[in-house]
Image: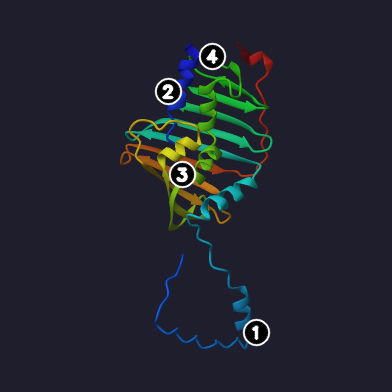
Amino acid sequence: MKFRAAVATAAVVPLALGLAACGGSDKPAAAPPAPVPAPTTVEAQKAVATTPPPPVRLNRTTFVPAMNAALAKQKSWRTSLQLQVRYQTVLTSEGVQTFKPAAMSLTMSGTAFKGKTAKIIFVKGNGYASIPGVTPAGKYAKFKSGKVAQLDQLLENGDPTRTFKSFDKALVGVKYIGENRMAGMWMERYEVTLNTAKAFAAQGRKVPKGMPATIMYTMWMDKSHLMRRMELELNYGFTSTVMTMSDYNKPVKITPPPASKIVN
């Protein structure tokens, strides 16, 4: 009971992370524009040939497919998350994740853990949790995926792909804001609005009390449409979450803890 209560408390903290027909016209058609003569010099021809195509701006129809297609090409990535309430940091987490095979290693610290660090490992269908005040220091409790709801939720909250899956059915609107230079590269910034009820339903969750009808993420993507940074503010900034993703396709090895560190 103590173990389940503790992980339930931890799981709730990052929940916020956890969607033309043209009418006829009587006006005569405009005359076609005059043809533009082709460049006659080698320099002019070279300039035309090397002009880059205009960037593709994503919209409500193309945003989710482009994001998912880019992520599907990745074998691994690193995540970082910070949650603030009343402008005070209450949770931070760092993790690494692999797509095939599915595995994750996540460390968390904050008020839910009384300033100490918790660690969750998921590999080969099994989970391992080291929770301050619940398991002995440096020891892990083993659980089967799908058997302990609170720990499954904790893993899902640290998995950005679960959040992204809810976008498809919950997406309300996508707005391109502009470009920003971040982490040494140019990023495309979008405001992405979701239907709250549909977003939580897509993740098999109930909407927490007090949530607005829609939620808006601010997301930064690189030129290949990989998500690099995601922000969410609720209650006029009273609660804010920032998640970053980096080190795509870097070598990662996630292993279970040794048997000597596993307790019942």
Q: Which residue is mark 3?
A: 170
The answer to whether 216 appears left or right of 51 in the picture is left
The label on residue 14 is none
Q: Which residue is mark 1?
A: 42
Disc 4 or 3, which lies upstream in sequence? Answer: 4
Q: Is residue 153 above or below residue 162?
A: above
SS for dot 3: helix
SS for dot 2: helix
Marks 3 and 1 sit apart, C-alpha to C-alpha, by 52 Å
SS for dot 1: helix
Crowding near the residue tagged with mark 1, few <14, some 14–19, many ≥20 C-alpha atoms within 10 Å: few
Across and down, in percent, residue 34 comes to: 51, 88
Q: Is residue 85 above or below residue 135?
A: below
Marks 4 and 1 sit apart, C-alpha to C-alpha, by 73 Å
Location of residue 233 (image quadrant): top left
The answer to whether 154 appears left or right of 231 in the picture is right
Residue at image x 38%, y 34%? 84
Residue at image x 52%, y 19%? 131
* In front: label 2 or label 3: 3
The label on residue 112 is 2
